Amino acid sequence: MNREDRIRYYENILDQAELAAKQLEAALDSYAFILPALRELESYYTGDDWKADFEADEQGLLPEGLKRGVLSEDGIDHVLERFSEIRARMSEEV
């Protein structure tokens, strides 16, 4: 590899690293922002209110147009598991 090609090659790595760092910082900011709400969601899901809301949905007591993905056990489990995996990955890769 000649000098110019080498410089271009490493310049490309530098550009990619700067972009990755910027994206990671934005993702970490977003993660830090949502974490308290995620903990609140987990508390709701494991508490009595969620059970009561789930039962009300099962009994047809909720309005038909009400978005209620939060009452899907799979939906909440999936999100909580993803965040758990992300935390583990962050710990492993640091």
Image (cartoon, grey):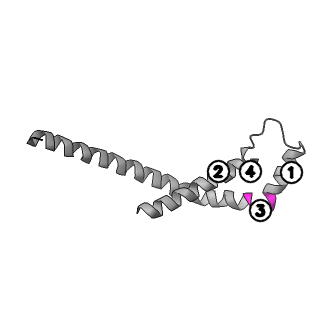
Residue 47's label in the rendered image is 3
- Mark 4 or mark 1: name the one nearer the start of the chain: 1
The quadrant in which residue 40 appears is bottom right
- Mark 2 or mark 1: name the one nearer the start of the chain: 1
Q: Amino acid at mark 4?
A: Glu
Q: Rounded to the nearest whole Å, what is the CA distance between mark 3 and mark 2?
A: 18 Å
Q: Amino acid at mark 3?
A: Gly
Image coordinates of residue 76 in percent, x first then y, are 68, 51
Q: Looking at this view, is 87 or 52 the one in front? A: 87
For residue 56, side relative to residue 20 (left or right): right
- Mark 3 or mark 2: name the one nearer the start of the chain: 3
Residue placed under numbered mark 2 in the picture = 78
Q: Amino acid at mark 2?
A: His
74 lies above or below 45 = above
Q: Looking at this view, is 91 or 22 the one in front? A: 91
**Mark 1: secondary structure:** helix
The quadrant in which residue 92 appears is bottom left
Image coordinates of residue 52 in percent, x first then y, are 84, 55
Residue placed under numbered mark 1 in the picture = 55
